Image: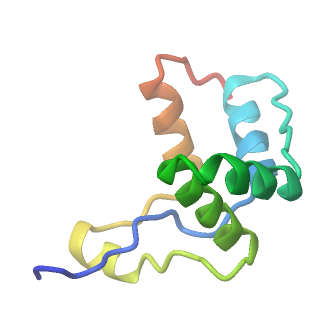
Amino acid sequence: MDGERIDIGWDRPVSMQEIARISGRLLDREIRVRTIPAGVINAASTVVGSFSPMVRDMGAMMRWFQTGRYVADPARQREVFGKVPTAEEAIAEFIRGLGHRIVG
């Protein structure tokens, strides 16, 4: 339907730590996650965002994600496109698309 919003996602919400764990298992190596403190992102988006709309928008998006209120609902995705992939399936496909061989 025109104008319909369809959330595209995985079978469940996953953290960056979990994505690193799954990816590491698939690649058979440790992957560490490094985070930039929210205050640094907010300050940078405020300063740089005053002359770069893209940076301002990215800062707003990051603040929204930090609220924890956004979780995709893949119900309509399932109706339109079929089976919703598991996080493991989607991450494996992404890794393959980058040209890496899955070992785990």
Residue 18 is at least partly visible in this image = no
Residue 92 picture quarter: top right
Q: In this view, does 25 lie above or below 87?
A: above
The quadrant in which residue 68 appears is: bottom right
Quarter occupied by the C terminus: top right
At a point 67% along the width and 68% down the height, the residue shown is 65
Q: Can residue 4 be seen in this view?
A: yes
Query: 66 above or below 75?
Result: above
The residue at the far front in this view is: 51
As displayed, is residue 48 above or below residue 82? above
Q: Residue 82 placed where, x, y %?
A: 28, 68
The residue under the point 67% across, 31% down is 26
What is the total number of numbered labels drawn onto the structure image?
0
Residue 33, percent from left and from top: 83, 38
> Residue placed at 74% from the left, 77% from the top?
67
Q: Is residue 73 left or right of residue 4?
A: right
Question: Which quadrant would the N terminus be assigned to in this image?
Answer: bottom left
Pick the front one: 20 or 89: 20
What coloring was used for the rendering? rainbow
Q: Nearer the viewer, residue 73 or 43?
A: 43
Front in this rendered view, residue 3 or 62:
62
Furthest toward the left, the residue is 2
Snapshot quadrant of residue 70: bottom right
Q: Nearer the viewer, residue 70 or 20?
A: 70
Image location of residue 75, percent across then percent down: 39, 82
